[in-house]
Amino acid sequence: MTRVPKQVDHAERRAHIAEAVLAVVARGGLEEVSVRHVATAAGVSPGMVQHYFRSKDEMMRAALERVGAAVQERLGAAGELPPRDLVRALFLQLLPLDRQRTREARVAVAFLAHAAVHPEAGDELRANARALRAHLGARLLGSTAQADAVATGLLALVDGLGLQVLTGQLAADDAVATLDAWLDLALD
Amino acid sequence: MTRVPKQVDHAERRAHIAEAVLAVVARGGLEEVSVRHVATAAGVSPGMVQHYFRSKDEMMRAALERVGAAVQERLGAAGELPPRDLVRALFLQLLPLDRQRTREARVAVAFLAHAAVHPEAGDELRANARALRAHLGARLLGSTAQADAVATGLLALVDGLGLQVLTGQLAADDAVATLDAWLDLALD
DNA sequence: TCCTTCGCGATGCGACCGTATTGCGAAAGG
DNA sequence: CCTTTCGCAATACGGTCGCATCGCGAAGGA
């Protein structure tokens, strides 16, 4: 058995394909995800997708994990600001205010809708949510019961605002204005 | 040409099938909606579904209109309470706190996720949202700018709380508690 | 140079999709 | 009773799906 060094970066290919999955989801939702579509979006052959992911399910799981990783990374990149501004900046990161974040928000809502109906697929999502909540809790007050209610409410508010912006129910400006008004309300 | 009076209630059949669509969506999301599945869920033949809806798209539109009608009806059934309690009652109607409302919320999020990615399909949804906002505005203060921000924020909050409950990120009790805390905050 | 191993493209299969088409039984006016 | 019309079941078709399988070409030790 002669060990031949890998001549392709397995992880990188998987990442590339997973990214293509997210692109397809952002453009057309989960229903448009098929091995063949993803392959086209990634600029590779369907066979290659199949080579790197043994099943569509495994492929979707990898794509979802990439979303989680991206969110984590985004959270880490927070400067040193007064708490109020920091919290505001963090929430603005979560709203679909530009192309990039619209893309991410679309992906997120697609997976959330799926999780609403297939609870077993929501573990990754719930883990991300927990991380977010923990992160926010640390940024706000100590863990008083009051602070927890505030954190929960603000997260839900941002989720709702994002959803309404995504579906065209609310203008992006209004969402930001509403967020600011409620931050005033909540943070004294 | 002899006119034969209808021996079946066309509208009723359509409603029955549309209801079956919603049942399928609530159980498995939009992806599981097919003419054959809907027919099975409705206890009729696939051919009959096709007879009453010329295309799947028309069927989906009818189902979505049914959701809108149900929401409208629900809003109408509000008693005479102090404004604060009335607003609270209204919002509790929108959270997935029991089987029935979980079903409706699942349907709603499925359609919302679709609309996030297919904007042209979101008209009905946006109309419903507008009706809701108007209804809430009338129940709250007069249309001061302040009241509008409060209404927008509360609606977004409820959307977000509902989404988190649906996806198992948040317990139903906590959602209600958070809603109450924020109602206190917002309504003086 | 041969030979093994890996990467991956190509092909095929069975299932399911939306929809067009056809035909038949029942109901009702003439 | 006959005939027309309506309600609907059945069937067929072309397309896409996920996935299993096969085979070839290139890349390196031996």
Image (cartoon, coloured by chain):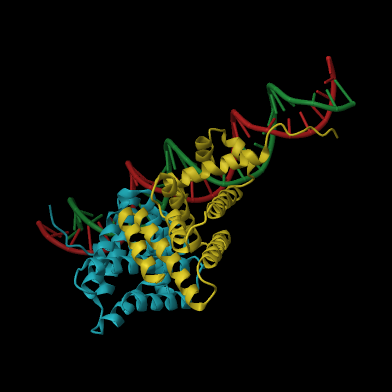
Chain colours: A yellow, B cyan, C red, D green
Quick one: quadrant of the C terminus of chain B?
A: bottom left
- The answer to whether residue B67 is left or right of residue A34 is left
Q: Residue at x 51, y 78 (%)?
A: A145
Q: Nearer the viewer, residue B50 or A125?
A: A125
- The answer to whether residue A21 is left or right of residue B134 is right
**Residue A179 location (% of width, % of height):** 36, 62
Q: Residue at x 41, y 62 (%)?
A: A158
**Residue A161 location (% of width, % of height):** 37, 60
Q: Quadrant of residue B152?
A: bottom left
Count of labels in the image = 0
Q: Is residue A18 above or below residue A186?
A: above
Q: Quadrant of residue A182?
A: bottom left
Q: Is residue B55 above or below residue B154?
A: above
- Residue with the most extreme bottom position: B81
Q: Is residue B77 above or below residue A5?
A: below
Q: Residue at x 58, y 59 (%)?
A: A124
